Image: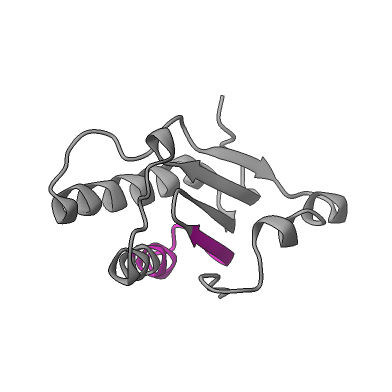
Amino acid sequence: MRPSHAGTFHVTARSIAEEHIFRDDRDYQHGVQILEELTNDGFFVCHGFCLMPTHYHLVGTFQEEMLKQAIRCLNRRYAGWFNWRHGRRDHVFGSPYKSIEVVREADASHLPDYIPETPPLRPW
């Protein structure tokens, strides 16, 4: 069961079969644009993210009942655009996203390993 309570979460979602879903600058830019729109629309507060060729990492603070809704919106919007742009169809993301609540400093200690301070990281 997915968390539905408010909190800060490290979220990751992977592509199907390690397919590259961020293939070029345009793909990365569109992913960033969707994240920016979702934060501007109040879905969550973004603390940092990293878009990688086969998956993404996101650290955000979500209000009650918003984690599932925000990630569903993010994944669906990106997948629809990606399929349209690359002339493909079917699923883009593999298994459901993973989310780990960041509740203690110890929980956050591993994040620099997953959310590096190098491009394509875009901290807010």
Q: Where residue 110 sits in the image (x, y, percent)?
A: 78, 53
Q: Is residue 44 visible?
A: no
Horizontally, residue 91 falls left or right of residue 52, namely: left
Horizontally, residue 63 falls left or right of residue 112, namely: left
**Quadrant the N terminus occupies:** top right
Question: Compared with residue 24, is residue 76 higher up or lower down, i.e. above or below?
Answer: above
Q: Where residue 35 sits in the image (x, y, percent)?
A: 41, 63
Question: Compared with residue 23, is residue 93 higher up or lower down, i.e. above or below?
Answer: above
Residue 12 magenta: no
Q: Where residue 59 sits in the image (x, y, percent)?
A: 61, 57
Q: Nearer the viewer, residue 27 or 66?
A: 27
Q: Nearer the viewer, residue 51 or 76?
A: 51
Q: Where residue 28 sits in the image (x, y, percent)?
A: 37, 66
Question: Compared with residue 26, is residue 73 higher up or lower down, i.e. above or below?
Answer: above
Give the residue at x 87% y 51%: 106
Q: Is residue 113 visible?
A: yes
Please report the bounds of the magenta region as a residue range. Answer: 34-51
